[in-house]
């Protein structure tokens, strides 16, 4: 069977409860998997990815109609292998109980924090990175000692079928299982009483998922999106900005939650930047229709949505520049050229909605304060990109803005860094995974106070007013005197 023929049979909604129950029973039977067990699971996943590398590339290509093989390698396969390697090296340290300070009133005692698996983690996977956005949180969940259920996207059926097959070959259903199906299955999935739920998708759907999880008091990690700005300082070379922003915008044809959504450019340099961006993208993608390096839009529906944004912008007075070096006709394909929008306004859909495609509005600003005010007036983004060689100015931008993550003089690459958290803020999401923060997200930090045979509390216990209690109060009075405030 070829990968393009793979089509997962939808999971019956009635089966979801049984799958979760089996995993919860298994978690209760082994509530604290040891280091060796976790490493064994990570190694099995590592080997499965290597064994299926070519099939993963082919599955993504089938789902997108064309997906650049290098993009699947760089964004789907490599980062998951890096994440596994990261946890293999550090897992023993993360699992070790942490010693904490013992306050005077509790002495003598030993105070620790133990990191225990939460139990069963539910993971809802979007279509834009159908392997990475399922397997990356799974790696953190496994490292923390959990079981997991993964719901794949119906818009990436070949990738979902392959993931289901891959994981079924190496894990029992009560360890890791993959479920498939449409919106009905996804809705039922998010209503399950997981011990933690990870959702990656739109802000609108994220609100629905959070409401569903609230009925079970299920903690959630929401990786959403929004409109991530790229700000160019007046001193920054435009050719360099165009190349670096273009890499992030061209990757996966802009179908990335952290893709630069719009550019804030000095007013007198907007046209020059548009020309530089056109030149850079024409160099990267000299042709489009039959170019395997340029990824297509995932579905006809998504392509129609993006084209409606451009039609709306043109109808309301914007200038639209399609970067199509060979002047190709894309009829019969889902290819869509990188497109610049000049003169965009807040009345246009392209500035009201997350773009999630190969469209880049370039907005003018007169001062850096005005540029930051524009960003501050809008929902906090998942990513912010600032281009400036001056470190002090970069530090100032970091201090004055809120976003899920930041790249200075780069775009999108921060997502692939395992040793720092990835997550949004406000409308762009909540919670983190990757790195140590991922391990902590999927663990219960359980406080433990351990006392020995000496019970000092007995000396200060009621009836209150005894000698030891009075001495304790005197010691506290000496320690907690009023502070001088300047």
Image (cartoon, rainbow, N blue to C red):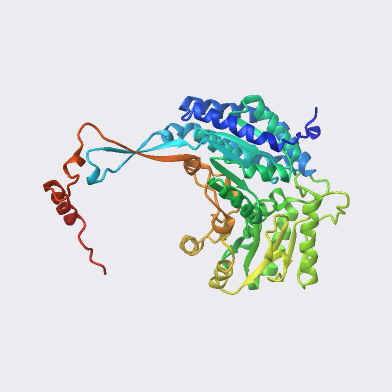
Q: Is residue 410 at all visible to an observer of this figure? A: yes
**Residue 147: percent from left, percent from top:** 56, 33
Camera-nearest residue between 482 and 119: 119
Q: Is residue 349 left or right of residue 396?
A: right
Q: Is residue 419 above or below residue 362?
A: above
Q: Residue furthest left?
A: 467
Q: Is residue 198 above or below residue 302?
A: above
Q: Residue furthest bottom?
A: 366
**Residue 214: percent from left, percent from top:** 56, 50
**Residue 429: percent from left, percent from top:** 57, 53
Q: Is residue 131 left or right of residue 434?
A: right
Q: Is residue 170 left or right of residue 328?
A: left
Camera-nearest residue between 182 and 232: 182
Residue at left offset 19%, top offset 53%: 476
Quarter of the image holding residue 234? bottom right
Image quadrant holding the N terminus, namely top right
**Residue 82: percent from left, percent from top:** 56, 36
Quarter of the image holding residue 138? top right
Q: Is residue 414 at all visible to an observer of this figure? A: no
Camera-nearest residue between 297 and 456: 456
Residue at left offset 63%, top offset 44%: 190
Image quadrant holding the C terminus, namely bottom left
Q: How many marks?
A: 0
């Amino acid at each position: 069977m070829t990968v393009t023929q793979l089509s997962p049979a939808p999971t019956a909604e009635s089966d979801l409860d049984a799958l979760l129950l089996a995993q919860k029973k298994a978690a209760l039977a082994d509530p604290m998997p040891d280091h060796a067990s976790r490493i064994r699971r990570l190694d099995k996943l590592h080997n499965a990815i290597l064994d299926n590398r070519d099939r993963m590339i082919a599955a993504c290509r089938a789902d997108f109609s064309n997906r650049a093989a290098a993009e699947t390698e760089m964004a789907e396969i490599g980062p998951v292998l890096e994440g596994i390697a990261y946890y293999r090296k550090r897992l023993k340290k993360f699992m070790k109980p942490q010693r904490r300070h013992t306050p005077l009133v509790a002495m003598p005692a030993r105070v620790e924090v133990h990191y225990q698996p939460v139990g069963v983690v539910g993971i809802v996977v979007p279509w834009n990175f159908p392997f990475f956005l399922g397997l990356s949180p799974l790696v953190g969940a496994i490292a923390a000692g959990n079981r997991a259920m993964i719901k794949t996207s119906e818009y990436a059926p070949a990738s979902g079928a392959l993931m289901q097959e891959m994981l079924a070959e190496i894990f029992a259903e009560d360890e890791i299982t993959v479920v498939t199906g449409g919106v009905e299955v996804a809705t039922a999935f998010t209503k399950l009483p997981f011990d933690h739920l990870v959702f990656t998708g739109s802000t609108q759907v994220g609100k629905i998922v959070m409401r569903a999880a609230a009925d079970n008091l299920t903690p959630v990690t929401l990786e959403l999106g929004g409109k991530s700005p790229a700000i160019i300082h007046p001193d920054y070379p435009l050719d360099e900005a165009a190349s670096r922003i273009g890499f992030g915008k061209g990757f996966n044809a802009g179908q990335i939650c952290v893709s630069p959504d719009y550019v804030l450019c000095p007013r007198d340099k907007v046209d020059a930047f548009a020309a530089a961006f056109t030149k850079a993208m024409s160099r990267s993608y000299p042709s489009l229709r039959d170019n395997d390096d340029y990824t297509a839009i995932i579905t006809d529906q998504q392509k129609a949505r993006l084209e409606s944004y451009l039609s709306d912008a043109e109808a309301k007075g914007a200038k639209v520049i399609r970067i199509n070096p060979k002047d190709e006709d894309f009829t019969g394909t889902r290819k869509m050229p990188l497109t610049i929008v000049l003169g965009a306004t807040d009345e246009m859909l392209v500035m009201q909605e997350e773009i999630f495609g190969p469209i880049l509005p370039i907005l003018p600003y007169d001062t850096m304060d005005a540029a930051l005010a524009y960003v501050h007036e809008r929902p906090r983004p998942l990513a912010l990109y600032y281009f400036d060689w001056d470190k002090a100015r970069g530090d100032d931008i970091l201090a004055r803005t809120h976003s899920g993550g930041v790249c200075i003089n780069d775009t999108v690459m921060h997502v692939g860094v395992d040793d720092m958290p990835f997550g949004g803020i406000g409308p762009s999401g909540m919670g983190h995974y990757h790195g140590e923060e991922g391990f902590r997200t999927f663990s219960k930090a359980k406080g433990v106070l351990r006392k020995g045979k000496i019970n000092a509390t007995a000396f200060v216990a009621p009836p209150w007013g005894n000698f030891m209690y009075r001495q304790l109060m005197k010691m506290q009075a000496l320690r907690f005197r009023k502070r001088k405030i300047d």
